[in-house]
Structure formats: C-alpha cells, structure tokens
C-alpha cells in the first residue's frame, strides 16, 4: 500500500469511527416505558410475540377468575341463599376446571418450544465473536477478522457524548454487520457474569472454564445497549455492553481500522511489560 493510499485509508477509517459515534440510538432503557424494547433480531421478534400471547392469556384468566369470584359472592351470599346446597361433587365442573388449564398450557407450550429451538439452534453462521466477562468489563475477540482483541470499559459521565446513556456507554463498542448470522461465544475469566442484550433477545451466562454459545442476526442498524445481568461483585452495575450495527461496507472498513488500532495497543502493552521485566 502506497503512502497516499495508506493516508486515505486512515482518513476514511477515522471518518467512519466518528460517524459510528453519532449513530441514532435504536434501543435503550427509557423512563416510564412499558413492555419490551424494540426487537432488532428475529429471535427477539418471536419473544415479543410470545410475550403478547401470554399477556392475552393472563388477562383472560384474570378476568375469568374475577368474574367467577364476583358471581359466587353475589349469587351464593347468605342473604340470597339462606339454605345452602349440600352437594359435594359436580362431575362436569371438575372436568372443565381440569381440562381448561391443560388446554391453556398446551397453547403456551407449542410456541414456547418453537422459541427455545430458534434461540438455541446454531444456524450456518458467517462470523464468530467471543465475549469474555471480567471484573468489571468485557473483552471481545474477533476470531474471523484478524483475531484482534479489545476491552470495553464503561464511560465516565464526563466522557459521555451527546445521546449516550449514563452507565451504558462504553469506550469501545462491539461493531457487527447488519443481516449477518453471528455466533457468539461467551466465557468468564474470574466469576460468573451474564451477557444480556434485551433488543437482541440475548441472555447467556459467562462461566469460568466453560464456553457457552448462542447466535444472533441484527436486522436494524443503530446502537444497542445491554449489561451484565449476573450479580458478579461490587462493580456489577458498571459492566455495560454496547453493540453498533452497521452496513457490511462500513463493517469492513471498521475491521481494517480496528486491526491497526488494537494491534498498536497490544504492541504498546507488550513493550511496557518487557520494560517492567
């Protein structure tokens, strides 16, 4: 690569890195919000649909029970029923209150099993990212793109850029391409952590000495925020996750810039360790 081409490449990468910082936030916690965050993956869309189905069922059951309670209180009060019946069994009612819950559970079970399979299966993924939980930050490895590694620490309040949420923004973000099936490997370096990204429908424990695996496919560009959802120590609440979904072209440019940036950081760290020795 000639000197001029190298300068052009670095300028383009710098522009991209600056542009990524201004990507509109697509999903993050908001005050007084109800329901789930907007889905950004097919699995999360199924989770949202299943959640809606359960809400309908729960609401129906609650209203039915409320109606029966009010009816019994009114119809069989002492004033309206001074001589209560001595009937102890009613076969039809017993069949109904046994069969109806079974039917409801079957209605819940069918989409539940389909959702578990969709979230747990490992489709033909196109790339792999490894997330390692540490006290109290995340390290990420891009094994299919030069095998570079970087750490992501929570930004202090005075470091936040406009639009970045407190306690959720990190100094380095995980950047992934849109419409790409990504295998996510999750491990713990010290204690049990948990990688959780609500908009992606992800929540997977990071266990020391073990690698857990899941997958996701982001279908919307933007910035997404999550956190460690396992109580892992005093810094538990300062262990956020920040993922930026960009176009495949932008991702390729970012990868080339990241290889140089994080390789330089790794080289400087090695020199410092050598000087200490």
Image: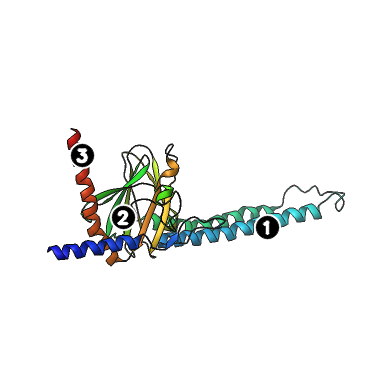
Sequence-wise first label, 3 or 2: 2
Proximity of marks 3 and 1: CB atoms separated by less than 8 Å: no
Q: Which residue is mark 2?
A: 183
Residue situated in front as seen by the camera: 56 or 216: 216
In front of the other: label 2 or label 1? 2
Choose top left, top right, bottom left or bottom right for residue 40: bottom left
Q: Which percent across, then down, holds residue 73?
A: 78, 52
Q: Which residue is mark 3?
A: 272
Looking at the rendered structure, the secondary structure element under dot 2 is: strand
Q: Which percent across, then down, holds residue 200?
A: 41, 57
Query: Which residue is depicted at the point 77% across and 49% down?
Result: 87
The disc at residue 64 is: 1
The disc at residue 201 is: none
Locate the C terminus and report the quarter of the image it occupies: top left
| Residue 59 visible, this angle | yes
Q: Which percent across, then down, holds residue 223?
A: 40, 59
Residue situated in front as seen by the camera: 31 or 145: 31
User: In this rendering, would 250 be left or right of 52?
Assistant: left
Task: Tell me the crowding category of disc 3: few under 14, some 14 to 19, or many 20 or more residues within 10 angstroms, Cα based.
Answer: few
Task: Tell me how far mark 3 sits from mark 2, CA to CA.
Answer: 34 Å
Task: Tell me how far mark 2 sits from mark 1, CA to CA.
Answer: 44 Å
Task: Tell me the crowding category of disc 1: few under 14, some 14 to 19, or many 20 or more residues within 10 angstroms, Cα based.
Answer: few
Looking at the rendered structure, the secondary structure element under dot 1 is: helix
Query: Which residue is depicted at the point 35% across and 51% down?
Result: 171
Task: Tell me the crowding category of disc 2: few under 14, some 14 to 19, or many 20 or more residues within 10 angstroms, Cα based.
Answer: many
Looking at the rendered structure, the secondary structure element under dot 3 is: helix
């Amino acid at each position: 690569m000639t000197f001029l081409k190298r300068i052009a490449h670095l300028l383009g990468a710098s522009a991209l890195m600056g542009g990524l910082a201004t990507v509109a936030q697509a999903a993050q916690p908001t005050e007084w919000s109800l329901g789930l965050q907007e889905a950004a993956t097919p699995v999360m869309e199924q989770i949202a649909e299943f959640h809606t189905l359960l809400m309908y069922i729960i609401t129906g059951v609650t209203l039915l029970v409320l109606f029966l309670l009010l009816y019994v209180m009114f119809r069989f009060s002492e004033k309206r029923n001074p001589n209560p019946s001595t009937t102890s069994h009613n076969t039809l009612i017993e069949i109904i209150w046994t069969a109806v819950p079974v039917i409801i559970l079957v209605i819940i079970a069918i989409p539940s099993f389909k959702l578990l399979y969709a979230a747990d299966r490992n489709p033909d993924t196109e790339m792999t990212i490894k997330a390692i939980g540490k006290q109290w930050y995340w390290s990420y490895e891009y094994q299919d793109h030069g095998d570079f590694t970087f750490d992501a620490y929570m930004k202090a309040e005075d470091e936040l850029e406009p639009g970045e949420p407190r306690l959720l923004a990190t100094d380095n973000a995980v950047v992934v391409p849109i419409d790409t099936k990504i295998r996510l490997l999750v491990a713990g370096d010290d204690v049990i952590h948990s990688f959780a990204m609500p908009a992606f429908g992800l929540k997977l424990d990071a266990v020391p000495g073990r690698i857990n695996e899941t997958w996701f496919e982001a279908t919307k560009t933007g910035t997404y925020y999550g956190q460690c959802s396992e109580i892992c120590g005093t810094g538990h609440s300062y262990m956020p996750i920040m993922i930026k979904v960009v176009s495949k072209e932008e991702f390729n440019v970012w990868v080339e810039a990241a290889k140089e940036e994080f390789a330089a950081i790794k080289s400087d760290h090695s020199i410092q360790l050598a000087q200490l020795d």
